[in-house]
Amino acid sequence: MSFIKTQDGTNIFYKDWGSGQPVIFSHGWPLSADAWDAQMLFLGEHGYRVIAHDRRSHGRSDQTWIGNDMDTYADDLAALMTALDLKDAVMIGHSTGGGEVAHTLGRHGTGRVAKAVLIGAVPPLMLKTANNPDGVPMQVFDDIRKGVFDNRAQFYKDLSMPFYGYNRAGATASEAIRESFTQQGLMGGIKGQYDCIKQFSEVDYTEDLKKIDVPTLVIHGDDDQIVPIGTSALLSSKIVRNATLKIYAGAPHGLATTHQDRLNADLLAFIKS
């Protein structure tokens, strides 16, 4: 079990496997580094050093009362990269983790980074506002907060259905994957996960995206029911310089699991390119 201690004394758990060019992963809400197992095993076997951390208040990291905000998430990730002295790294983020990658690059620069990948990522802004009329209404996020507060276990179990597209006609749900999703969510702390809802919904990452100056691959499923593609990838891929957009037809939000072989191949090709 590997941890770093951040400036405020929080212990951040991370996995660090293999050797070679580093690839560092940021997971989605409310999951943990384990959500990246298929990608880490695949890229590790192809000669890369693969690293994934549990965001504070998620997984095996400390559950904190304060600091559950995107500025601190980015500082934690930058601290991990500094502690491991990562250079020429590829940063990969899914969903909220995509916001974390974007904000880390916007806040701390790209000096240690060669490339970035945003998968089903929340940038530039999920929330519907006057300037973002196609965004998701606040009521949706208030309902998420209520679900987490009232019965977190049931909410996560139910969320796994649209997350993986298992609620679509003809889809075959994996109960084991649904259980894993629920278990990963329940490993984290309710306070931090509750706070994080605001971070993936209300934070505007536009200025962060403008600062990314490394080649960036944007991957999104066009049947993503959690982070609609129209308010995310279709916009962020136009804001980021040197961005390449790949749309997975019919893919859900949790495509790292449902489309793992295709995603693994695309990641490997992009890293090698």
Image (cartoon, grey):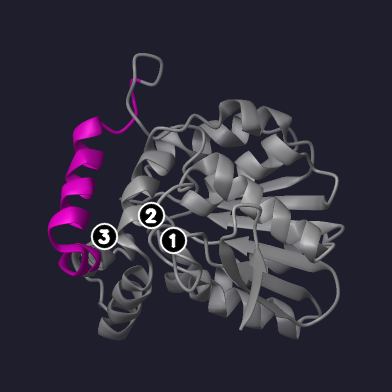
- Residue 43: which quarter of the image? bottom right
Question: Where does the C terminus fall, quadrant-wise?
Answer: bottom right
The magenta span reads: 133-156
Left or right of residue 113: residue 265: left
Q: Which residue is mark 2?
A: 192
Q: List x then y, in percent, for residue 200.
A: 42, 43
Magenta stretch: residue 152 in it? Answer: yes
Magenta stretch: residue 15 in it? Answer: no
Point 38% across, 61% down: residue: 30
Residue 18 in sight from this viewpoint: yes
The circle drawn on residue 162 is: 3
Question: Where does the N terminus fall, quadrant-wise?
Answer: bottom right
Q: Nearer the viewer, mark 1 or mark 3?
A: 1
| Marks 1 and 2 close (CB-CB < 8 Å) | yes
Point 52% across, 42% down: residue: 70
Mark 1 and mark 3: Cα distance apart in space: 24 Å
Q: Which residue is mark 1?
A: 57
Residue 246 in sight from this viewpoint: no
Tell me the element at label 1. loop
Given residues 85 and 234, the one toward you in this image is 85
Judge whether 237 appears above or below 2 on screen: above
- First of labels 1, 3 by sequence position: 1
The circle drawn on residue 69 is: none
Q: List x then y, in percent, for residue 176.
A: 30, 85
- Residue 168: which quarter of the image? bottom left
